[in-house]
């Protein structure tokens, strides 16, 4: 395996990562940017790919001919900025029909809508020129554990995936798992749960994962080990890098801003396993702090990318012989000091 070089890494971000700063306790504090302005920011910051929710590209109520026209316009804007679509994710969690699922909803009409919306997202992905759909099963869980049949729910999640794999024979589904928020308890809370489902689908070769750092931390798991598990199955097809200060709401902090060692280990596992050499993209899912003024509300994207690339440099510069020497001698105390010194630039 040839380790990834800096040039192997292409970066992506979503339009929602440039946002006006509203949170559950307060209104927006900055003006919303036009989509075209966001693309310009992405281009200027050196991003090559854009992540989309279906309705970031095409309004949900567009007819199929409108969908083609609007997606064509979005694709042209991407082209004009030297950008490509990385994936499309169906936004199943905002519509009233998604209030209790919708894939695992107890209501058959909601489940039918979930499939229609999934198919529409696949159509939008095709029109934007990507074969990847990310599924974050936001409300596929419960607020009250006794409210759903958990075994039936997993079966419904499997059926939904199978129907979409059947709908588009080139589609790849990347599950992005998270243990909670907005639900109290999620079905398939970890990547491991998801991969078990992936192997039960009609075409496991087209089902992989996108792993978000913060989601792992919310589980009390180490993101680099989660990446490693998916890499061992050849199923790490995307990442959402960010950081997270302990077990609380999903913070989407700038990559490496909380725990630099944890960030280093994520970059190191990607570098050592040739991530990016088969078209995988380094995605960010980061939020600007609400305190940032409008003209500085893109810096979280810049700093996350810079931290990632600085850590790639460190992965290439670090003395691997010395590292291996501590492993061979089983002197893990000295190995800890070695890693910490490297992170301090000593
Ligand atoms: C939710 C999350 C989503 C997905 C895309 O926590 O990370 O933004 O990344 O639907
Ligand atoms: Mn994410």
Image (cartoon, rainbow, N blue to C red):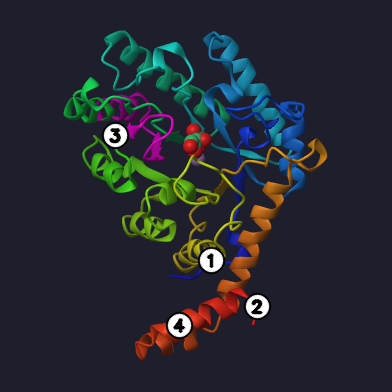
Identify the residue at horizontal 67%, vertical 40% (top origin): 83
Q: Which residue is mark 3?
A: 187
Q: Position of residue 111 (x, y in %)?
A: 31, 15
Magenta stretch encompasses residue 13: no
Circle 4 SS class: helix
Circle 1 SS class: helix
Contact between labelled residues 1 and 3, with CB atoms less than 8 Å apart = no
Q: Which residue is mark 1?
A: 264
- 182, above or below 62, in the image: below
Identify the residue at horizontal 73%, vertical 26% (top origin): 32
| Mark 4 or mark 1: whose residue is earlier in sequence | 1
| Mark 3 or mark 2: whose residue is earlier in sequence | 3
Packing grade of label 2 (10 A; few <14, some 14-19, many >=20) is: few
Q: Position of residue 64 (x, y in %)?
A: 52, 11
Identify the residue at horizontal 39%, vertical 34% (top origin): 170
| Mark 3 or mark 4: whose residue is earlier in sequence | 3
Q: Is residue 159 left or right of residue 316?
A: left
Q: Position of residue 80 (x, y in %)?
A: 74, 35
The quarter in which the N terminus is drawn is bottom left
Rounded to the nearest whole Å, what is the CA distance between mark 4 and mark 2?
15 Å
- 130, above or below 316, in the image: above
Q: Which residue is mark 4?
A: 335
Circle 3 SS class: loop
Foreground pick, 311 / 3: 311
- Extreme-right residue of the structure: 295
Foreground pick, 107 / 275: 107
Q: Which residue is mark 2?
A: 345
Q: Position of residue 6 (x, y in %)?
A: 62, 64
Packing grade of label 3 (10 A; few <14, some 14-19, many >=20) is: many
């Amino acid at each position: 395996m040839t380790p990834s070089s800096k040039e192997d890494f292409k970066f992506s971000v979503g339009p929602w990562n440039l946002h006006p700063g509203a949170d559950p306790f307060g209104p927006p504090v900055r003006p919303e940017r036009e989509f075209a302005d966001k693309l310009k920011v992405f281009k200027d910051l050196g991003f090559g790919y854009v992540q989309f929710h279906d309705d970031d590209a095409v309004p949900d109520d567009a007819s199929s001919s409108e969908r083609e026209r609007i997606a064509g316009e979005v694709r042209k804007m991407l082209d004009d900025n030297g950008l490509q679509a990385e994936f499309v994710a169906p936004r199943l969690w905002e519509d009233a029909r998604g209030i209790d699922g919708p894939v695992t909803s107890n209501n058959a009409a909601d489940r039918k809508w979930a499939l229609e919306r999934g198919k529409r997202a696949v159509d939008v992905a095709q029109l934007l020129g990507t074969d990847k759909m990310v599924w974050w099963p936001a409300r596929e869980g419960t607020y009250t554990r006794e409210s759903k049949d958990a075994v039936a729910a997993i079966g419904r999640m499997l059926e939904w995936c199978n129907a979409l794999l059947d709908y588009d024979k080139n589609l790849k589904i990347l599950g992005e798992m998270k243990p909670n928020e907005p639900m109290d308890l999620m079905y398939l809370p970890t990547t491991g749960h998801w991969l078990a489902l992936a192997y039960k689908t009609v075409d496991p070769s087209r089902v992989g994962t996108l792993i978000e750092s913060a989601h792992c931390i919310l589980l009390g798991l180490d993101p680099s080990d989660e990446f490693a598990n998916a890499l061992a199955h050849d199923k790490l097809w995307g990442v959402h890098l960010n950081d997270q200060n302990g077990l609380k709401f999903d913070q989407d902090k700038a990559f490496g801003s909380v725990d630099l060692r944890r960030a280093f280990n994520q970059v190191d596992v990607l570098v050592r396993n040739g991530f990016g050499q088969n078209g995988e993209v380094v995605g960010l899912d980061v939020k600007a702090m609400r305190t940032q003024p409008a003209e500085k509300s893109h810096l979280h994207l810049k700093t996350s990318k810079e931290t990632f690339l600085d850590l790639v440099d460190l992965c290439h510069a670090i003395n691997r012989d010395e590292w291996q020497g501590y492993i061979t001698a089983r002197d893990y105390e000295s190995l800890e000091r070695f890693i910490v010194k490297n992170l301090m630039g000593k």
